[in-house]
């Protein structure tokens, strides 16, 4: 009898324990009662009715790293649904661009289950559905773009993929947060051609920059020569102006000096007549002095106006005699 009671007690304990479900944070469990959806368990301790209530299993996808360092994808049925953001690294696939170039692309998807009921009842295999939807959407998006656009428009591709996937997966209770293109690998011959084109473009830009630099250098040299010529001409102009002004000022001062000298001489000798004769005579005397001062002068020609000189000298003598 005691053995039966012990067995019954053990069964009661096991039955009670099977009705206790502990759910971890950021996880949830879908409970079905007699095959029909009953409720969703939240984080913490939850009580269910054994045998009557059963967790609904769902397919989930995991990535594990093997001993050889490579990553392996594992798919298995689980009773708990992870509510955290999940990363799906899809295998590489070949897509054809608008200009018929086969390109290998690897995409990464970030999504989060926001409605676990829809994720379980609206789709039979959520990971496969998301993977196939991403692959087909990626083919459609890349198929509308050329290879050059594909290589330079990653942000555009990511935005289009995220928008399409978010709209399509919304009814599955999934929110697609980000889609990233990890690798875009054109064929080897295309990559070689692109490298040659890039090298040619670099050489072209280098030659253009060199030509522009030489052109700018010549322009600057010519402008420098122009400025130098202008400055030189301005300097010569100013020099000539100053020289002319100096000569004019010197002549004016010489004339003023001569005028003052004549005035002083006139006042000194008290000439009553015209002092012009005196000045003319002095000029003639100076000129004759210069004519006879040369070493190689063999003959002296007396100009015709010598009588005027003599008369001027005589006039000087008369003026001096008058002052006696």
Image (cartoon, rainbow, N blue to C red):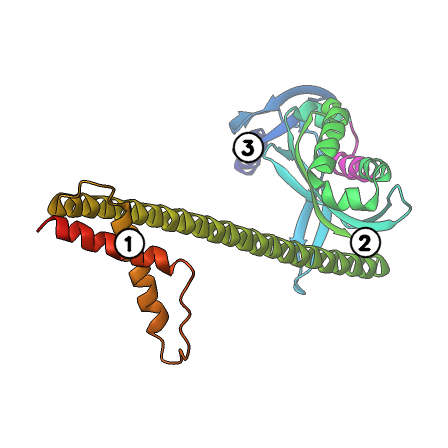
Looking at the rendered structure, the secondary structure element under dot 2 is loop
Identify the residue position indicated by label 3 in the image: 26
Give yes or no for contact between labels 3 and 1 (Cβ–Cβ under 8 Å). Answer: no
Residue 61 in percent (x, y) is at 71, 43
Badge 1: how crowded within 10 Å, few (<14), some, or many (20+)?
many
Dots 3, 2 in contact, CB < 8 A:
no
- Residue that extends furthest to the right in the rendered view of this protein: 100
Q: Closer to the N terminus: mark 1 or mark 2? A: 2
Can residue 58 be spotted in the picture? no
Taking the magenta stretch, the answer to whether it contains residue 180 is no
Q: Residue at 49% across / 51% down in the picture?
A: 233
Alpha carbon separation for disc pair 3 and 1: 136 Å
Closer to viewer: mark 3 or mark 2: 2
The residues bearing labels 1 and 2 have C-alpha atoms spaced at a distance of: 116 Å
Left or right for 71, reference 200: left
Dot 3: element: loop
Mark 3 vs mark 2, CA separation in Å: 40 Å
Element carrying mark 1 = helix
Relative to 202, 309 lies left or right: left
Question: Magenta includes 131?
Answer: yes
Which is nearer the eye, 198 or 45? 198
Q: Nearer the viewer, residue 242 or 85?
A: 242
Residue 30: mark in rendering: none
> For the magenta stretch, what is the residue range?
123-135
Q: Which quadrant of the figure has residue 167?
A: top right
Residue shown at 51% from the left, 49% from the top = 230
Describe residue 13's horizontal placement relative to residue 192 as left or right: left
Q: Quadrant of the N terminus?
A: top right
Residue designated by label 2: 186
Q: Which mark is residue 312?
A: 1
């Amino acid at each position: 009898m005691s053995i039966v009671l012990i067995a019954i007690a053990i069964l009661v304990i096991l039955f009670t324990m099977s009705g206790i479900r502990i759910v971890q944070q950021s996880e949830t469990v879908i409970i079905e009662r007699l095959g029909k959806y009953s409720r969703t368990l939240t984080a913490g301790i939850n009580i269910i009715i054994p045998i009557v209530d059963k967790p609904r299993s769902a397919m989930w996808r995991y990535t594990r790293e093997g001993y050889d360092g490579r990553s392996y994808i594992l798919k298995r049925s689980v009773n708990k649904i992870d509510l955290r953001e999940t990363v799906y690294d899809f295998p590489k696939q070949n897509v054809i661009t608008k200009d018929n170039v086969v390109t290998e692309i690897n995409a990464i998807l970030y999504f989060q289950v926001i409605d676990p009921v829809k994720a379980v009842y609206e789709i039979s295999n959520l990971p496969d559905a998301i993977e196939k939807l991403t692959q087909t959407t990626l083919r459609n998006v890349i198929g509308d773009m050329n290879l050059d656009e594909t290589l330079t428009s990653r942000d555009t591709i990511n935005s289009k993929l995220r928008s399409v996937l978010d709209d399509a997966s919304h009814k599955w209770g999934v929110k697609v947060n980000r889609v990233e293109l990890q690798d875009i690998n054109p064929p080897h011959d295309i990559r070689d051609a692109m490298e040659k084109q890039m090298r040619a473009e670099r050489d072209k830009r280098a030659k253009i920059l060199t030509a522009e630099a030489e052109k700018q250098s010549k322009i600057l040299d010519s402008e420098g020569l122009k400025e130098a010529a202008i400055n030189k001409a301005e300097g010569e102009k100013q020099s000539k102006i100053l020289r002319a002004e100096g000569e004019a000022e010197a002549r004016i001062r010489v004339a003023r000096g001569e005028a003052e000298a004549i005035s002083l001489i006139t006042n000194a000798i008290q000439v009553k007549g015209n002092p012009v004769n005196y000045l003319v005579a002095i000029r003639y005397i100076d000129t004759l002095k210069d004519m006879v001062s040369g070493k190689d002068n063999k003959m002296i020609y007396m100009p015709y106006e010598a009588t005027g000189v003599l008369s001027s000298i005589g006039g000087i003598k008369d003026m001096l005699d008058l002052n006696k």
